[in-house]
Image (cartoon, rainbow, N blue to C red):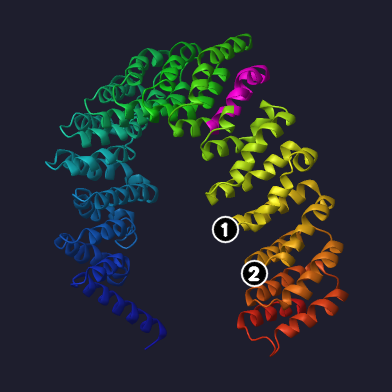
């Protein structure tokens, strides 16, 4: 038997084993076998796969949902196994059954695979794209849409647009049939189906627009408007998510006349979820409208969201305020009118934001803290100092640590809001409070923002007036490892910013003292990790004169094995910054001792040997 024959025999045996697994009693075995259908098909060949394997699978379709989900997934990748794009239709009947499943996970995977096959076959066999769409996909979607089971109709909603992708200019009748199917689904008795129709109306509208934009204006938008008036809030909610894309397809000359009544209705909706989504999508919709409409219609609507009785709506509105303000200013074509727009923002929005900084809901304040400062570039320095600064100060003193942290995270914009002197005066209490927060994640987040703060303040204010270097050094002794490691990264960033002289006078002595004075071995290891990191940005003189003696004389002889192997690892990283003479005199003897019989800890020996190998190389 040749090697090729042996390989084919092995593949056949593996396929036979998987086929047996498809009928096995164990669920896990059936799932595994189903996931290996491509291997079975490859062993059987395209013809037998189409004529034997797929019919067998169709007969045994009643199985556990996990098996059916695996089947739905794998069928989408079996185009080559059945003989290529010209045989794509052999896979669709089985996937149609799966797309009608009661189990959502199975249904979704079936739809995904149908989409995948439709796209692949169109790309590989473009001359048959329209034929497959009209003769196979459209009838399949029609059957799903006409099913008594709402789960099938849900899948139909998702597949209508996919079907239209294959239509050519000669398939206008098929397009109208697809639109009719969607219109019927949008009027379904089940809210779940209507919701799916609303979610996918934008996909279909974009396909329809490629054929005839008037159909969007006369048909698709009317369907969207009807869905936006549905008696179920979940349907109206979904209609809003599709609105920006559908509105964008309308003629500019008619856009505002057609969509403003729908927008106003959604803004005033009784359901908070609908108002929430409208507040979220209003920024995207505003891109499609004139500057006058933005000022006269959209801004008042957005103000109502900031005043909404529901905290979730106020929260999302607070998050979107800078984006809407920016669009409002940028949409003004006449530069002479920009000042008027800014005055409107100052008059209508800022007073409400002033109330929100003390909102009873902390999530509103958290959202505002992240976004308030972003208004500064839009309203100008004078208005910023006059109106925004006081709000920032209130948020910096908020009782909730996340609010204070979010303000500090906006430091790149804070320099526009206040002078360095004001920054130092108001930030210090907030930073100190957050640095001592019981939640270690808050402490970690503060550390991550320190380099940005250091750039804003400058070395003199950061070090001499705010004494933040001392605060940064205290984090080396934090009880949480992640905080200690973040503090090392922070000190390295500060060294890059303020220079070697600063590090030598303030950081290096503290790191050495941390090792020598710590009774807890974890802090001694932190000191060694800091040495390894800082050595990359400090001169050879400091590494050889300050760090090397500590590591070789003290750390390598530490009574705790963890410290010793950390020392060996640190020496390995220091090698490239040490001169040849000092390597031979100070490093090699120490590492050789750590690999000798005197050392009884295997981890120490391994790290020392690795360091020695690096020296030899």
> Disc 2 designates what residue?
521
Determine the main secondary structure of the stretch shown in magenta.
Answer: helix
Q: Quadrant of the C terminus?
A: bottom right
> Disc 1 designates what residue?
480
Q: What residue appears at the point 72 percent right and 62 percent down from the top-left corner? A: 514
**Vertical arrangement, residue 319 with respect to residue 62, above or below:** above
Left or right of 453, for residue 195: left
Q: Secondary structure at mark 1?
A: loop
Q: How many marks?
A: 2
Left or right of 44, for residue 559: right
Q: Secondary structure at mark 2?
A: helix
Residue 153, quarter of the rendered image: top left
Left or right of 355, for residue 416: right
Q: What residue appears at the point 34 percent right and 81 percent down from the top-left corner? A: 10
Q: Is residue 386 magenta?
A: yes
| Contact between labelled residues 2 and 1, with CB atoms less than 8 Å apart | no
Left or right of 462, for residue 227: left
Q: Position of residue 405 (x, y in %)?
A: 57, 39
Seen from the viewer's position, the closer of residues 167 and 589 is: 589
Q: What residue appears at the point 84 percent right and 62 percent down from the top-left corner? A: 542
Q: Quadrant of the N terminus?
A: bottom left
Mark 2 crowdedness (10 Å alpha carbons): few <14, some 14-19, many ≥20: some
Seen from the viewer's position, the closer of residues 200 and 531 is: 531
**Vertical arrangement, residue 287 with respect to residue 598, above or below:** above
Which contiguous range is marked in magenta?
A: 369-393
Q: Quick one: label 1 or label 2, which is nearer the N terminus? A: 1
**Vertical arrangement, residue 268 with respect to residue 483, above or below:** above
């Amino acid at each position: 038997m040749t090697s090729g024959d042996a390989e084919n025999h092995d593949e056949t045996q593996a396929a036979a084993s998987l086929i047996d697994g498809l009928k096995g009693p164990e669920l896990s075995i059936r799932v595994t076998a189903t996931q290996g259908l491509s291997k079975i098909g490859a062993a059987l060949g395209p013809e037998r796969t189409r004529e034997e394997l797929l019919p067998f699978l169709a007969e045994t379709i009643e199985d556990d949902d996990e098996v059916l989900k695996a089947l739905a997934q794998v069928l989408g990748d079996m185009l080559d196994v059945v003989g290529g794009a010209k045989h794509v239709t052999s896979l669709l009947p089985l996937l149609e059954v799966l797309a009608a499943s009661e189990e959502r996970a199975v249904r979704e995977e079936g739809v995904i695979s149908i989409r995948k096959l439709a796209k692949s076959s169109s790309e590989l066999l473009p001359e048959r794209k329209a034929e497959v769409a009209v003769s196979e996909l459209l009838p399949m979607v029609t059957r799903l849409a006409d099913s008594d089971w709402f789960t099938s109709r849900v899948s139909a909603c998702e597949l209508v647009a996919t079907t239209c992708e294959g239509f050519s200019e000669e398939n206008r009748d098929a397009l109208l049939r697809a639109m009719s199917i969607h219109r019927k689904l949008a009027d379904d008795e089940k809210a779940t189906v209507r919701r799916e129709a609303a979610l996918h109306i934008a996909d279909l509208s974009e396909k329809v627009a490629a054929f005839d934009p008037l159909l969007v204006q006369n048909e698709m938008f009317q369907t969207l408007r009807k869905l936006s008036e549905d008696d179920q809030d979940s349907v109206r909610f979904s209609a809003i998510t599709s609105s920006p894309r559908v509105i964008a397809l309308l003629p500019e000359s008619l856009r505002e006349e057609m969509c403003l009544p729908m927008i106003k209705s959604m803004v005033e909706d009784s359901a908070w979820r609908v108002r929430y989504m409208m507040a979220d999508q209003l920024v995207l919709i505003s891109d499609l409208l004139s500057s006058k409409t933005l000022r006269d219609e959209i801004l008042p609507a957005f103000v109502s969201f900031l005043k909404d009785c529901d905290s979730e709506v106020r929260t999302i509105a607070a998050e979107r305020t800078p984006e809407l303000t920016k669009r409002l200013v940028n949409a003004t074509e006449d530069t002479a009118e920009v000042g008027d727009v800014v005055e409107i923002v100052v008059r209508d929005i800022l007073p409400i934001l002033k109330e929100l900084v003390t909102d009873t809901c902390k999530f509103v304040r958290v959202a505002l803290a992240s976004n308030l400062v972003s208004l500064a570039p839009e309203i100008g320095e004078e208005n910023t100092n006059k109106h925004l600064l006081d709000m920032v100060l209130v948020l910096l003193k908020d009782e909730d640590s996340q609010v204070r942290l979010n303000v500090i995270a906006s430091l790149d914009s804070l320099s526009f809001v206040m002078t360095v002197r004001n920054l130092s005066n108001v930030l210090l209490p907030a930073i100190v409070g957050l640095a001592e927060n019981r939640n270690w994640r808050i402490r970690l987040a503060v550390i991550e923002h320190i380099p940005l703060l250091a750039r804003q303040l400058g070395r003199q204010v950061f070090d001499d007036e705010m004494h933040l270097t001392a605060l940064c050094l205290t984090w080396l002794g934090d009880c949480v490892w992640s905080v200690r490691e973040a503090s090392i990264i922070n000190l390295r960033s500060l060294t890059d910013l303020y220079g070697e002289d600063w590090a030598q006078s303030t950081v290096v002595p503290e790191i050495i003292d941390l090792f020598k004075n710590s009774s807890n071995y974890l802090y001694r290891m932190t000191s060694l990790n800091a040495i390894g990191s800082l050595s990359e940005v400090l001169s050879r003189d400091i590494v050889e004169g300050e760090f090397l003696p500590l590591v070789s004389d003290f750390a390598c002889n530490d009574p705790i094995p963890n410290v010793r192997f950390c020392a060996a690892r640190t020496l390995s990283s220091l090698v490239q910054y040490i001169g040849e003479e000092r390597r031979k005199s100070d490093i090699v003897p120490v590492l050789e001792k750590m690999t000798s019989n005197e050392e009884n800890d295997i981890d120490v020996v391994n790290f020392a040997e690795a360091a020695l190998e690096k020296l030899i190389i």
